[in-house]
Amino acid sequence: MKKNIIKWGLRGLLAVLVIIQFFQIDRTNPPIESEKTLAVVDPPPAEVMTLLKPACYDCHSHETVYPWYTYIQPIGWWTKDHVEHGTKHLNFSVWGDYKEKRRLHKYEEIAEMVADKEMPMGVYLPAHKDARLTDAQRKLIVDWAKSKMVMEAPVPEAPAGEEEEADDEDGAA
Ligand code: HEC
């Protein structure tokens, strides 16, 4: 009796595993408009770019490469979920669409997340050797992101939405 329950339980599980394989994910990337990409709008130094590409671009750009195991469900679903959430929060392919303030904020978050080893995501690393960053590589990314925060912070023209003191000079002439 007990044997039968196990037997049918396993068959049921197998059936579920077979059925979910029919629900494949969409592996097509949205089209890339190169003039909007980080690489064109605000190109990082080459040594940083060669780290970002393998460590971040699968989840934070429209250049996602879907490995063979994403054809196996539910692994594909999890992957797709990471890509959808990742690109929603940070997308290097549409950097040109971000306002100045947003870019600064993203650079800040990149420095923070990479320094704290929160990114790239831990689950991603076992299958992606070249995404495993050494401390020196993390420092390269963090230093780059921080340099962007410093350099772009004191913009001379008033950023949109902050017009304090903008009309001071009016009566001067
Ligand atoms: C396996 C997918 C994956 C990889 C690889 C990955 N990320 Fe992420 N990242 C995510 C997801 C998913 C989120 C959204 C987190 C959440 O929903 O809590 C995120 C969030 C972030 C955020 C927060 C953005 C915000 O404004 O909230 C930053 C910054 C970030 N990632 C940077 C990076 C950097 C830099 C790399 C490469 C060094 C990287 N990530 C690699 C999946 C990934």
Image (spheres, rainbow, N blue to C red):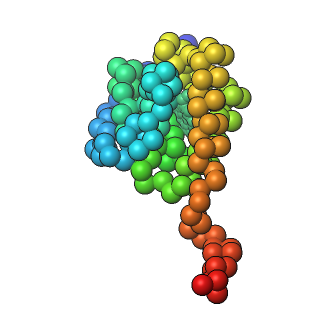
Q: Nearer the viewer, residue 95 or 16?
A: 95
The reply to whether residue 128 is visible in this rendering is yes
Residue 138 position in % (x across, y down): 62, 22
Ligand 1 resides in the quarter of the picture at top right
Residue 145 position in % (x across, y down): 60, 36
Q: Residue furthest bottom?
A: 171
Question: What residue sits 69% from the left and 28% below the top?
Answer: 115
Question: What residue sits 32% from the left and 46% below the top?
Answer: 35
151 up-or-down from 77: above or below: below
Placement of the C terminus among the 4 image quadrants: bottom right
Number of callouts? 0
Question: What residue sits 50% from the left and 12% below the top?
Answer: 129
Residue 150 position in % (x across, y down): 65, 43
Residue 115 left/right relative to 74: right
Q: Residue furthest front?
A: 173
Residue 83 position in % (x across, y down): 46, 37
Placement of the N terminus among the 4 image quadrants: top right
73 up-or-down from 97: above or below: above
Q: Residue furthest right?
A: 116
19 up-or-down from 171: above or below: above
Dividing the picture into quadrants, the one containing residue 28 is top left
Dividing the picture into quadrants, the one containing residue 125 is top right
Q: Nearer the viewer, residue 72 or 37?
A: 37
29 up-or-down from 16: above or below: below
Q: Nearer the viewer, residue 116 or 127?
A: 116
The reply to whether residue 78 is visible in this rendering is no
